[in-house]
Image (cartoon, grey):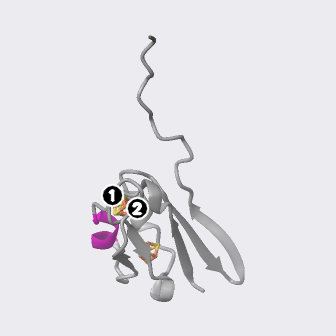
Amino acid sequence: MAGKIIINIERCKGCGLCIMACPKNSIIISKKSNKNGFFPAQADNTDCTGCGACAIICPEAIIEVLRNQSGKIETIAEPDKKPKPSLIKEKA
Ligand code: SF4
Ligand code: SF4
């Protein structure tokens, strides 16, 4: 493994920016929708180099990137762990 990405598919909006940014065509759009009704990006890590371009461009910051550096796995990008904003409940 040169590189690997992990996408939080339930938070993906299916915008496709990561697909356009990937120089290795290592990301595709899933045929199955997520719980919000979006067709999320799906990693195909076969040719991933761990460059991090997909994580940088993702507006949702939901892509984790790992890269194999001489046998040592390094985290290149971490997803935003902030919880999704939710509507404020109105008081009765
Ligand atoms: S880290 Fe780079 S090569 Fe791997 S999926 Fe993302 S953009 Fe493509
Ligand atoms: S850039 Fe982010 S939100 Fe857009 S398709 Fe890729 S993973 Fe999903």
Amino acid at circle 2: Asn
Tag 1–tag 2 contact (CB < 8 Å):
yes
**How far apart are labels 1 and 2 at the CA level?**
5 Å
Q: Is residue 84 above or below residue 73?
A: above
Residue at which label 1 appears: 37
Residue on which the image places disc 2: 34
Image-based side of 52 in relation to 78, left or right: left
**Label 2: few (<14), some (14–19) or many (≥20) C-alpha neighbours in 10 Å:** some
Secondary structure found at label 1: loop
* Residue 85 numbered tag: none
User: In the orientation shown, which residue stands out farthest toward the right?
Assistant: 72
- Residue range (magenta): 16-21
User: Is 17 within the magenta?
Assistant: yes
| Label 1 beta carbon within 8 A of ligand 2 | no
Residue 81 is left or right of residue 19, and the answer is right
Residue 15 % position (x, y) = 28, 60
